[in-house]
Amino acid sequence: MTPSVPAGVPGQFTLVLHSHLPWLANHGRWPVGEEWLYQSWAASYQPVFAVLRGLADDGFTDVLSLGITPVLAAQLDDPHCASSMYEWLANWQLRAMELATDRDPVRAAAGGAHFRDAGAAIADFERHWRHGASPAIRALASSGIIELLGGPLAHPFAPLLDARMRQFSLGEGLADAHRRWGHTPTGIWAPECAFDPGMEFEYADAGVGHFMVDGPTLHGDTALGRPVGDTDVVAFGRDLTVSYRVWSPKSGYPGHGAYRDFHTYDHDSGLKLARVTGRTVDGPDKAPYDPDRVDAVIDKHVEDFVATVRDRLIAESDRIGRPAHVVAAFDTELFGHWWFEGPTWLDRVLRRLPEAGVSVGSLATARERGYVGDPVDLPPSSWGSGKDWRVWAGPQVQHFVDLNAEVVDTALTTVDKREQHDARDRVNDQILRETLMTVASDWPFMVSKDTAAGYATDRAHKHAHATREIADAAARGRESSARALADGWFAADNLFADLDARRLPGPEAYAKGEGR
């Protein structure tokens, strides 16, 4: 049981973490590629899981909803990634050891701190992660400390995706979660919190009971979950008043001058040695990171957040005339990867909230406790800039919209025309696998935000080329060539081996107007 709490604060607070990276294995190393995965693994996934294990050991339960996308789960289970991660951790420790011998005592002390952190990460990896993430995830779920959220396979921007492919991606994503974790999530984090009217019926058909949207999708009224349309599927909205205290487009705790700076690297060691210092201070002018400055700042931000949650719960409960529900949602990678002190803050917040009289629980618990209001019709939306679809469908990424439509049409046309058999068809499987990799929401996001735009464009076109190449051979009746190409492209990524094209919804229902 969660420790008892003092009375006085109505309602429930829910923290939701969304864990996601695109498929990076064997697609470059640095500055964009596998390094991104290993940094996030060491800086975020390892320490956040350690925080959750520690809370479970101390008797806490149901402290948050944790979303893990199928494409990230696949990487964390991949043997190549696990082996390379182990090497990456060892390399981190070697670089730290060299820095620890520096004649500059400040740099040497920083090297010693990194050496100790790397050693602790290696020990944690050997104990909890050496055989992939699924055992660690199952252990957390079994402890009752989290609710697991699933999602569509390969993280597509669903509103822009053909309905058949959209339903296929969701069904395969939930099936992938069940195979890895022995549990089919009833809640999902829709990629980019993206929604289009009608998707609620697809969620209901797939067995999804609740999902996340951003606050403006509910016109800012996020005090209760809302059934969507004529379904029992509940949309929970992110409370921006609370969420933006931690992280927003312009501000948040991680920007405090005492915290370790994310962007500034020491060129000799490749390690992060500077503190933020100031928002307008250039990298070379930033002061050295000083751990002794940090502890009091973390406590200050913990108390600020707890007070914000308390005040928001009280105010929203008064406004709606019943106990309210407040949801704060973030990318998991914020905690540790982007904000070095984030896991420590997270641990202290989750312990402090019950002490302050705040009831904490997952989205599933909020639904069970009745934090659900009247039905609502949701507009087209996302959690991106403008809270609309511009990041994934704006003029700067129209070429992705056109590419995705063409590739999806090619894939569906080819699969529909091929003779269907009872047995698995690895050609069809790979056509759909490469198509889903083409339409991943990450690629247009990285272009719109100008973060490794060239890499993103190359990745989308590489998977599009694979789709076209296999589909062309299949369409021309060159079956042996199609199979060889499918096998070759599959071996290149070794991804989603259980994807089964036979589960693709047929075109018949759509032609008759029965499909949603």
Image (cartoon, rainbow, N blue to C red):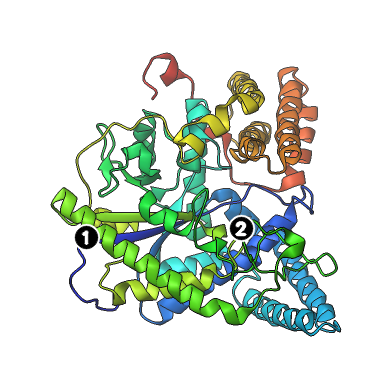
434 horizontally vs 207: left or right = right
Q: Which of 354 and 499 is in front in this view?
A: 354
Viewed as shown, does residue 315 lie left or right of 433? left
> Residue tagged by mark 2?
279
Q: Position of residue 377 (x, y in %)?
A: 29, 31
Q: In this view, does 319 lie to the left or right of 217?
A: left
Image coordinates for residue 338, horizontal then vertical, percent: 60, 60
Q: How crowded is mark 2: few (under 14 residues within 10 Å), some or many (20 or more)?
A: few
How many dots with numbers? 2
Mark nearer the viewer, 1 or 2? 2
Look at label 1 and name its amino acid. Ile
Look at 79% across and 54% down and name the residue there: 29
**Up-down: is 69 above or below 55?**
above
At label 2, the amino acid type is Arg
Residue at the location (73% across, 31% down)?
461
Quadrant of res 268 = bottom right
Q: Residue 289: which numbered mark, if any?
A: none
* Residue 97 appears anywhere in the view: yes
Q: Do the residues labelled 1 and 2 touch (CB within 8 Å)?
A: no
Mark 2 residue element: loop
Which label's residue is closer to the chain start, 1 or 2? Answer: 2
Residue 451 in the image: x percent, y percent?
68, 43
Q: How far apart are marks 1 and 2 (CA)?
A: 33 Å
Q: Quadrant of residue 98?
A: bottom right
**According to the image, label 1 marks what residue?**
314
Quadrant where the N terminus sits is: bottom left
Residue at image point 48% right, 20% down: 507
Q: Is residue 2 visible?
A: no
Nearer to the camera, 230 or 382: 382
